[in-house]
Amino acid sequence: MSDALLIGLAVAAGVALLLLASAVRIVKEYERGVIFRLGRVIGAKGPGLFFIIPIIDRMVKVNLQTVTTDIPPQDIITKDNVTVRVNGVAYFNVVDPVRAVVAIQDYRYGTSQVSQTTLRSILGQVQLDELLVNRDEINRQLQQIIDDVTDPWGVKVTLVEVKDVELPDSMRRAMARQAEAERDRRAKVIHALGEREAAEALGDAAAVLETHPGAMQLRVLSTMVDVAAERNSTLVFPVPVELLRMADALTGERRA
């Protein structure tokens, strides 16, 4: 066998090995391989080991894991004309690898841009109090709108959260004064209710004592016992007004 023939066989074996190596593809569990044959999509394969036709086929890997993307801070004017700075976070994943490759050039960048514009649009339609209180409803609305836009791309948006709302210093001071005034109002209302309940209780007690005069005497004696138990105390014995009137009446009769 000549040297030229050996060299030819070696070259052929090397080319065969290269073609075999380029034909073997391994896709991980969380990935899919979108196959293009002569420029046309024939489907997505994986996970695991499979073969493609070298030179004719081309494979694009798509990650199916959930992607977390930050929504950069956005300057937003709310419905009640308050300027706030809001940022957020979005969670999404690819559910259709073929559409994620064919329908959009970069689904991650596209989802990020849609999240930013939707955040500005939705928060510009709510008042500041709604933004601070109804956070769950706003998050749900953002998720639904963004998911509707990214659905043709084969992307599922699972969650959108508004992370932080930065208020101007003047607005923070105004809200602090409002909260302080609200606490003062509640304290005054609670104090007034306590006074009212105390007055009602005293009125009920007065009605009982008026119905049972002996109870008043027992109450006076009980109070005297409590006062006498203290050292260095001066005990003042109250004289009923009715007794004084009776004494005056007897004195007048004797004089007459």
Image (tube, rainbow, N blue to C red):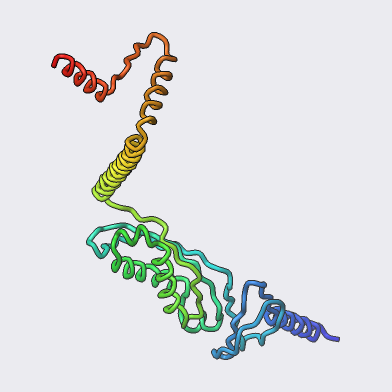
Q: Is residue 38 visible?
A: yes
Q: Nearer the viewer, residue 196 or 225?
A: 225
Residue at screen point 47% across, 64% down:
69
Q: Quadrant of the C terminus?
A: top left
Q: Is residue 256 above or below residue 30?
A: above
Image quadrant assignment for residue 75: bottom left
Q: Is residue 100 above or below residue 210?
A: below
Image quadrant assignment for residue 116: bottom left
Q: Is residue 17 above or below residue 86?
A: below
Residue projecting furthest to the left? 256
Residue 229 image position (x, y, % from top left): 44, 15
Residue at screen point 40% across, 67% down:
137
Residue at screen point 60% across, 90% down:
42
Q: Nearer the viewer, residue 240 or 39?
A: 240
Q: Is residue 218 above or below residue 140?
A: above
Q: Is residue 203 left or right of 60 when viewed as pictured?
A: left
The number of callouts visible is 0
Q: Is residue 159 left or right of 236 when viewed as pictured?
A: right
Q: Quadrant of the N terminus?
A: bottom right
Q: Is residue 183 visible?
A: no
Residue 7 image position (x, y, % from top left): 77, 82
Q: Is residue 96 left or right of 175 when viewed as pictured?
A: right
Q: Is residue 90 left or right of 234 when viewed as pictured?
A: right
Image quadrant assignment for residue 160: bottom left
Residue projecting furthest to the right? 1
Residue at screen point 72% across, 82% down:
20
Residue 245 image position (x, y, % from top left): 21, 23
